[in-house]
Amino acid sequence: MSDPVTPAAPANRFRDSLSNGEFVLLVESSSPSLSNDPIAAGERLAAFEEAVLSVSNVNTALAVTDRYLSLDAWRAVEYANALREENRDRHVIYLSGRNTTGEELRQLSDAAAKSRLFNVVPVSGNCVPGDTLRECRKRVFSESVGVIRNLAERKEPFFLGGTTNPYAYTPFTMMGQYFKLVKKLNAGASFVVAQAGWDMLKLQSLRWYFSGRSLFYPMIARLVLLTPNLVEKILAGEYPGINISPDFQKILEKELRYSLNQFEAAQYRRLELQAAGCRLLGFSGIQLAGAETPGRAKIAAERIGNALREFNSFDSWLEEYNSYLARAEMSPFTGSFYLYDHTLRRAYPDEEIPVARDFGEPEITPGEKFRFKLRRFLFPHADRQRAESRRLLKKLFASCRGCSSCRLPKTEFICTEGCPKRLPNGPCGGVKPHGNCEIAPGECVHSRIVRLAHWNGTLPALEDEILDSGWDD
Ligand code: SF4
């Protein structure tokens, strides 16, 4: 009897590009509204795919986003079925946990596996634009950490990405983002996608933090090709997690006073510089938003391909980048926090583990101190007891909402159920740059946890625990 032969893993050119260090350009296509005729929508996607893949000076593929800003849209898994079968291993699809139960996610994962769409980026999802806090609280948000773990445990060869928002400008929001990303990597993500923004220092800090901890995962930076309409929408807050700094806004307003052609030329040049900079900072690729017609996508991709050739040294790139942006301040407010000194003076840190800036004294109110001490006194071992134990006291003193496993001692005695999306593992991508919640008034629950951990002196231990174990819910 012959030995059973292990079936060869299916080809995955996207995974291979990342592991071979071949720079990847993913061009975004959003799943269309359900009111669109599916055949016509499929034909449009096929035409888009053809245009993107016809670009020869850079390694291109698609990233199909999943009901990004609306609920009235096709699921990316269904929509991506219109992609040519032989190309599906090149592309990436998103899987949103918003308004999606665990069972629905299982069915969508089955459908992705059946269609051989194995490159998947699970996200917890934004609030729907226009949602009130109450409406948002009523929605189901299946958190990306758990979805990544479930997909990683399946028998099919899913190749998973984890997203993060590096544009966080307090140490506590920023560390919350980094910790959550570590959990995603520990859960089974093999590459990273950074939320869109324009602050290259923040992209560099992300790289330095992870490489300083020997977490050498391929990273893809999401960039946006701006149009006047998009600028307006971002400024109106319609794209949670994407922010334009006051200085950058002034530059854009100046550019908008010129003709549309001149505005476009300025955006293409900015995009080229950002894309080339990302590669020189060690990113493995970029994901381009805002170029959703075949013509625009092709022009943008070709220009990016040329820019990658134009800039092959960090110093020449930096000189051009600084002169083009006239050293505009990309941080959203005075006193914004950056983790490292002297970023963007050199591409890589001089030390193996770059020295981080001090977080300073956190502002803690007397009320916060009192609540922390009271809860620690009342519930020191709540994570080792049945969740129902001392429920009434927890309701009274820790705003307990009655979840099935209590983790108060692990979260500085702040119940993560206070998050409108009930995300247990860390901040969503919609958290505001100064640490406020995407939808609720006041500080993000997860930012508050990190701030209290810093005050309490437990932040290094929390970081070590997450780095070592990927502790999650
Ligand atoms: S509390 Fe934080 S994680 Fe929850 S919705 Fe608000 S910003 Fe997002």
Image (cartoon, rainbow, N blue to C red):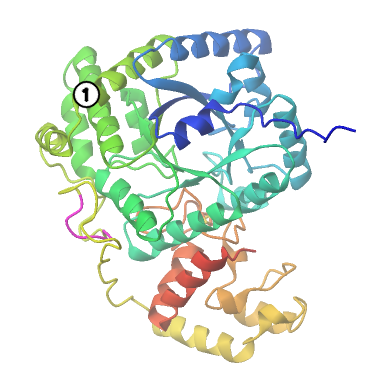
Q: For this view, does 263 lie left or right of residue 93?
A: left
Q: Residue at x 58, y 56 (%)?
A: 420
Quarter the N terminus occupies: top right
Residue farthest toward the front in the current orientation of the protein: 1
**Is the stretch drawn in magenta largely helix, strand or loop?**
loop
Whether residue 385 sits left or right of residue 44 in the image: it is: right
Asked which quadrant contains residue 243, the reply is: top left
Front residue (pair 450, 320): 320
Crowdedness near tag 1: few (<14), some (14–19) or many (≥20) residues, C-alpha within 10 Å: some
Image location of residue 36, percent across then percent down: 63, 14
Above or below: residue 51 compared with residue 398: above
- Label 1 is placed on what type of residue? Arg
**Could you say whether the residue bearing mark 1 is in a helix, strand or loop?**
helix
Q: Residue furthest right?
A: 1
Residue at x 61% of width, y 63% of height: 472
The part of the chain drawn in magenta is 338-343
Residue 264: percent from left, percent from top:
25, 18
Q: Position of residue 287 (x, y in %)?
A: 42, 31
Question: Quick check: is 436 in the magenta stretch?
Answer: no
Q: Is residue 4 left or right of residue 390?
A: right
Residue 139 shows up from this direction? no
Which of the two residues, 125 or 366, is positioned nearer the viewer here?
Answer: 125
- Percent from the top left, x then y, of residue 390? 73, 84
- Asked if 463 appears above or below 302 in the picture, the reply is below
Q: Is residue 155 above or below residue 232?
A: below
Res. 365 in view = yes
| Left or right position of 18 against 4 | left
Please tell me in which quadrant of the rendered image residue 363 appears: bottom left
Q: Which residue is mark 1?
A: 269
